[in-house]
Amino acid sequence: MLDSLIPLLILGLAAAFWLDALKAHERARGFCLQLCERGNVQLLDQTVALHRMAIRRDETGWLAWRRSYNFELSTDGADRRQGRLTMIGQRLDSYSLPVAHAVPDALH
């Protein structure tokens, strides 16, 4: 009896992890869209890629996944710059956007 429950338990844990990862990725994508809209830049390719994952404690002391995502954005549609955001669980922890470079006036 117990031998048949162990594979089901493992399968259930794998499914829960997979669903949590999908939910976190969708939330990260939503955060990226919001950040790009606020920064008046364009999120390129509508893609957000998982860069790193680790277990950390959240603000309440519980263990949670800390996921770092990389994404690309453009300030003018021709350039590609990289941004990063970090989530702990399903909550945005930090983000980093490239500093916009000043465009000099026409040279005389």
Image (spheres, rainbow, N blue to C red):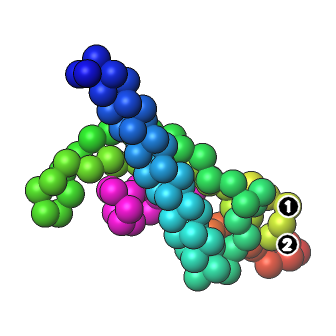
Q: Secondary structure at mark 2?
A: loop
- Which residue: 60% across, 46% down? 49
Residue 83 visible to the viewer:
yes
Left or right of 95? Residue 74 is right
- Which residue: 70% across, 65% down? 43
Q: Give neighbour class at mark 1: few <14, some 14-19, many 20+ (Cα, 10 Å).
A: few
- Which residue: 38% across, 62% down? 90
Left or right of 89? Residue 49 is right
Residue under pointer 1: 78
Q: Residue 25 versus residue 3: which sits nearer the camera? A: 3
The answer to which of marks 2 and 1 sits earlier in the sequence is: 1
- Which residue: 83% across, 66% down? 77
Q: Quadrant of the N terminus?
A: top left
- x and y, in percent, of residue 58 in the image: 20, 57
What are the residue bounds of the magenta stretch? 81-98
**Three-letter residue code for mark 1:** Ala
Q: Quadrant of residue 52?
A: top left
Dominant secondary structure of the residues highlighted in magenta in the image: strand
Q: Which mark is residue 107?
A: 2
Q: Give neighbour class at mark 2: few <14, some 14-19, many 20+ (Cα, 10 Å).
A: few
Q: Residue 73 versus residue 66: which sits nearer the camera? A: 66
Give the alpha-carbon distance from disc 2 to disc 1, as whole Å.
22 Å
The correct choice, above or below, for 79 with respect to 54 in the image is: below
Q: Quadrant of residue 35?
A: bottom right
- x and y, in percent, of residue 105 in the image: 80, 78
Q: Secondary structure at mark 1?
A: loop
